[in-house]
Amino acid sequence: MKFHNIRKAPLPEEYDPQRRNRKVYLAFAAYGAASFAICGESLLVLIAIHFGFGDTFCSVLGAFLYLSYLVLPAGYYLAAGIGVARSIAFQTMITVLGSCLMLLAVLVFPQSGRTAGILLTAGTVLFFFAKSSGSAMLLPLQANISDDRNRPRMLGKIAACSNIAALLTTLAIALILHLFESSWSYPVLLGGGSLLGMLSALSILKIREPPVLRKIAGYPVLQQILLGWREPIIRKQLALGCYLNLSLIMLIPVEMLMVKQGMGLTDAQVTTLWAVKVTASIAGAPVWSFLTQRFGSSKVCAGAILLIPLLCLFWGLTPLPQLENLVFLPFLTSGVMIVFYSNSLLDFFMKSVKSYKQQGGALLVVVITGGVAGLLGIGLNALLFEILEKFLAIQENTQEFYRRVSLKTYFGKTA
């Protein structure tokens, strides 16, 4: 008689019903990351620059991502009403509608720049706002399709699939823009992003969600937020989070404008630099784990924050001949920096805030730090660029203008 090693054999699906859900979620995450890489922040600003929208307009586009966190609580109400999987799929389809409006903006730009600007702004708002509200129930969903035994492996796979999908998509964008230097490249790319978004929505609908998720979504949001507000450590993190998000809102558009407008790089070269940033984020995750275990998350976060003024000094003070050879360094640094400080803040939050206050506290931190920083970022970016374009751009070369923008934005002074 032949005996099988039952302990080492994987459980059949009927004994581990969530295994199928985990596979479905991986497909949803990969399609969503690829769609965001096309229709999200970097390519969006590049499109605005390529079609000649003003620097002020380009500078405020990235702030909509953070402003969209204000609508995060809407995801809870929608999930409580129609179910988690359906609500995420519905909001993902709204992101597809947003990307279609971006595509339409590119097509109508030759006929009407004003109409194109309105469509691009509307598409950006729809895309980012639906993306944020759709993410409200992702963590509870992940927790309920896994257990303590397989959750770490599942989270690792989700991170790996999302990062690899984003990196491969970014490299594909760079290759397409290099091979086909035409205005038609952008409608094709945005159409591909819309298709990937639809595949992501269809994937999440295949999940057999546990009934408890709708109950979790129905918990009173306001009570959870007030519970988190009573925690002093959360209020301190609110101030820190607003500062960091505002710094990123004001840094990323200037990076893109500097390499595109100030240095005259091609769209393919700019996208390749963004791929360097994504690669740095992926490689920085294990480095962050090592440093955190050795020094603690608070010290690692402090070190990451110090990189922000160093990046500004690099952009403002590096001579153009050296900048052309070292332009990859700030993108490499910012990719590592974002992973370091975001993971450190999350680790510190989970260690310092009591478990029963974490859901409301996390919602409060995301909504306040994202929403407040988004509002301030839109206002400050627009104001600074209007002032600098009026008083500094006259009879100055382009690089000198953007060097002054960088210094004025982050240090309150000009070169």
Image (cartoon, rainbow, N blue to C red):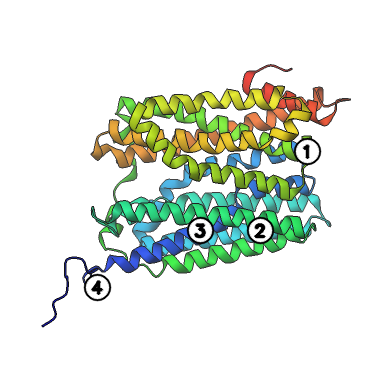
Q: Estimate how packed mark 2 is, as few (under 14), some (14 to 19) or many (20 or more) residues with alpha carbons within 10 Å.
A: many
Front-lying residue, 361 or 283: 283
Q: Quadrant of the N terminus?
A: bottom left
Mark 2 lies on residue: 101
Q: Estimate how packed mark 4 is, as few (under 14), some (14 to 19) or many (20 or more) residues with alpha carbons within 10 Å.
A: few
Picture residue at 45% right of the left edge, 67% below the top = 203
Mark 1 lies on residue: 261
Q: Estimate how packed mark 3 is, as few (under 14), some (14 to 19) or many (20 or more) residues with alpha carbons within 10 Å.
A: many
Q: CA distance from mark 4 to mark 3?
A: 29 Å
Secondary structure under the numbered disc 3 in the rendered image? helix
- Residue type at numbered disc 3: Gly
What is the number of the mark on residue 12? Answer: 4
- Which badge, 3 or 2, is on the more N-terminal residue? 3
Picture residue at 74% right of the left edge, 23% below the top = 404
The answer, for residue 104, to whether it is visible in the render is no
- Which badge, 1 or 4, is on the more N-terminal residue? 4
Circles 1 and 4 in contact, beta carbons < 8 Å: no
- Which badge, 1 or 3, is on the more N-terminal residue? 3
- Which badge, 4 or 3, is on the more N-terminal residue? 4
- Which badge, 2 or 4, is on the more N-terminal residue? 4
Secondary structure under the numbered disc 2 in the rendered image? helix
Secondary structure under the numbered disc 1 in the rendered image? helix
Vertical placement of residue 58 versus 163, above or below: above
Q: CA distance from mark 1 to mark 3?
A: 30 Å
**Horizontal and vertical percent position of residue 42:** 64, 46
Marks 2, 4: nearer the viewer: 4
**Horizontal and vertical percent position of residue 391:** 81, 22
Marks 1, 2: nearer the viewer: 1
